[in-house]
Image: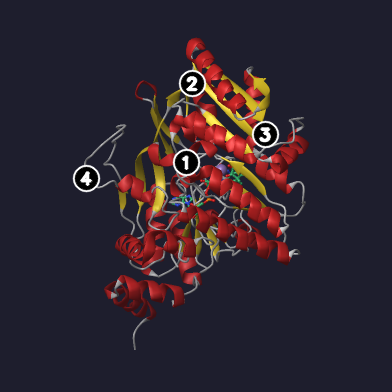
């Protein structure tokens, strides 16, 4: 009679001979074994008893992110303190076909950490060292648990900043995993453009540096771009344990302004005109009238309740003044008005914090709700069309929806409030989100500019990249994770 261990190993060998199709098919139907008490002991042997928790509250806290997806707690949570822990835990889970879900700070919006197939949640927050800051080279290296605000506080006296700024204080490696972005992307790009190297642990325990050990050049053409293969992988290929990131000098002068418009189209046309004039803006964010109303109430402002643009200009005295003149002309051409300026650091920080808090501002209007946000991105010339159509659809559906976001990148959000005790509103929001994503895809755009696919956009990914593209993604996945233990059930249908 086979021993249990041999049976599991045999199963793993059989699976590895499966083709991707068969593997993936099995993965959906495949019933993962649960975590045995023997395995719990082995995990405790690796990380220490205090770093393994089966407590319900801890599992619950690791069973959901900030999305509306139903919580699915893992069977247990393991806290890793170093890359050796990560490597041994991964290998053990891999040998036992146990799902492994990397956890950053749980601020994801797509159900990326929900343990829908059970297994182990690997919390990386104890790996919180800032390992290097190379001021003269404008780069730094951080461990998985360092958050973006922790890094920027550490950098405060250096005159350097890491500019990618999702609204939450997310872990930087989580931001790598979701290919995050934020209000500064107009000027600095997204995570894709700002990661120089990653240390990654594969499910079989191998540890490798995606650009080669110690590499930290702004550009490279040495072999495949493995770094950007892991940026946006959402925990489905491996665990990111270190990130080497680009840093930037803080601009000499910045000025921020808000102006309002008679219609959404006027505001978005202004954005397109500014970008097509080649004006190098630092930020251009859009908030529609309902978002402005929530913004005012939550952050105690008195902005005109109308479609508005939040803009930031950077440069030196001369260039800044020129930018402002040019932009003011374009704003006036599109009937913009009510310019409100913020020039003092404190005023600017308050204004952009209020922008970052917009999700909470909207949620405050319907206490107990969870946010559900579209995240489409289109070529800039298509932006007015998709934004106006999305708002028309929301108005016709008769539910509350806030339209806002990073129009400077062609990326915006329709934000809905989901309450489980309002099922019809939830159904309408989900239906609208799919409709808007499909409109964006028809306009040569994508269903997700920055939040990722996670649990809710798997069909949209298939629609976007097609059968062939998805098969190739699955082949890549099965190369790195032949047992499909890495965050199973996410990204792929
Ligand atoms: C109020 C508010 C506002 C915003 C946002 C959230 C909230 C709550 N976000 C979304 C979120 O902050 C963003 O997706 C972060 O990148 C998530 O980072 P966490 O560390 O929280 O990842 P979290 O722990 O939520 O995990 C997210 C995914 O990454 C994987 N993962 C995490 N750490 C990993 C690691 N070390 N290795 C491998 N996989 C890992 C997880 O398995 C999961 O699939 C956002 N986003 C954005 O791009 N732009 C924005 O403007 C905003 N705005
Ligand atoms: C809608 C939220 C989550 C966001 O991405 C933003 O505020 O830009
Ligand atoms: Mn956003």
Q: How is the image coloured?
A: secondary structure
Residue identifier under label 2: 250
- SS of the residue under disc 2: loop
Q: Is mark 1 within 8 Å of ligand 3?
A: no
Q: Do tag 1 and tag 4 residues touch (Cβ < 8 Å)?
A: no
Estimate the spatial distance between the alpha carbons at disc 1 and disc 3, rounded to whole Å: 28 Å
Residue identifier under label 3: 354
Relative to residue 337, is residue 142 drawn left or right?
left
Quarter holding residue 55: bottom right
Q: Do tag 2 and tag 4 residues touch (Cβ < 8 Å)?
A: no
Circle 1 crowding by C-alpha within 10 Å: few under 14, some 14–19, many from 20: some
Estimate the spatial distance between the alpha carbons at disc 3 and disc 2, rounded to whole Å: 21 Å
Residue identifier under label 1: 381
Residue identifier under label 4: 223
Quarter of the image where the C terminus is located: bottom left
* Residue 60 place in picture, x, y as percent: 63, 60
Q: Please say whether residue 79 is visible from this viewpoint.
A: no
> Looking at the image, is 237 positioned above or below residue 242?
below
Viewer-nearest of discs 1 and 3: 1
* Residue 50 place in picture, x, y as percent: 55, 54
Circle 4 crowding by C-alpha within 10 Å: few under 14, some 14–19, many from 20: few
Q: Do tag 2 and tag 1 residues touch (Cβ < 8 Å)?
A: no
User: Which of the marked residues, 2 or 4, is nearer the chain's N terminus?
Assistant: 4
């Amino acid at each position: 009679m086979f021993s249990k261990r041999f049976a599991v190993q045999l199963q793993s060998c059989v699976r590895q001979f499966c083709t991707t199709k068969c593997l993936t098919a099995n993965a959906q139907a495949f019933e993962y074994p649960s975590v045995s008490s023997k395995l719990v002991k082995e995990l405790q042997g690796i990380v220490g008893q205090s770093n393994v928790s089966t407590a319900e509250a801890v599992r619950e806290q690791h069973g959901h992110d900030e999305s509306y997806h139903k919580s699915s707690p893992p069977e247990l949570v393991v806290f890793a303190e170093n890359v050796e822990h990560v490597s041994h835990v991964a290998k053990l889970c891999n040998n036992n076909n146990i799902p492994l879900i990397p956890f950053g700070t749980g601020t994801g919006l797509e159900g990326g950490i929900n343990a829908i197939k059970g297994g182990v949640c690997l919390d990386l927050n104890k790996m919180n060292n800032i390992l290097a800051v190379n001021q003269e080279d404008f780069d730094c290296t951080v461990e998985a648990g360092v958050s973006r605000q922790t890094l920027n506080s550490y950098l405060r006296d250096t005159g350097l900043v890491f500019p990618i700024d999702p609204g939450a204080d997310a872990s930087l490696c989580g931001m790598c995993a979701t290919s995050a972005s934020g209000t500064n992307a107009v000027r600095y790009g997204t995570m894709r453009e700002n990661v120089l190297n990653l240390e990654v642990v594969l499910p079989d325990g191998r540890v490798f540096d995606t650009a080669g050990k110690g590499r930290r050049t702004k550009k490279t053409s040495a072999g495949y771009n493995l770094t950007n293969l892991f940026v946006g992988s959402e925990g489905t290929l491996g665990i990111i344990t270190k990130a080497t990131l680009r840093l930037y000098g803080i601009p000499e002068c910045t000025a921020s302004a808000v102006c309002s418009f008679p219609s959404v189209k006027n505001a978005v046309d202004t954005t397109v005109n500014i970008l097509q004039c080649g004006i190098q803006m630092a930020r251009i964010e859009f908030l529609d009238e309902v978002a402005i109303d929530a913004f005012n109430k939550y952050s105690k402002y008195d902005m005109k309740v109308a479609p508005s643009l939040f803009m930031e200009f950077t440069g030196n005295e001369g260039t800044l003044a020129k930018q402002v003149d040019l932009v003011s002309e374009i704003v006036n051409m599109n009937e913009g008005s009510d310019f409100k300026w913020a020039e003092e650091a404190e005023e600017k920080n308050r204004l952009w914090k209020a922008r970052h808090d917009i999700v909470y501002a909207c949620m405050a209007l319907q206490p107990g709700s969870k946010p559900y946000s579209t995240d489409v991105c289109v070529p800039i010339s298509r932006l007015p069309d998709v934004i106006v159509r999305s708002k028309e659809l929301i108005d016709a559906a008769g539910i509350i929806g806030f339209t806002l976001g990073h129009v400077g990148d062609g990326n915006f959000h329709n934000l809905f409030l989901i309450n489980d005790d309002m099922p019809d509103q939830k159904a309408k929001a989900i239906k609208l989100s799919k409709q808007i994503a499909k409109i964006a895809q028809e306009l040569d755009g994508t269903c997700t500019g920055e939040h990722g696919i996670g649990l809710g956009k798997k069909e949209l990914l298939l629609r976007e990249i097609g059968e062939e593209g998805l098969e190739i993604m699955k082949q890549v996945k099965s190369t790195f994770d032949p047992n499909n233990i890495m965050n199973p059930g996410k990204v792929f249908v």
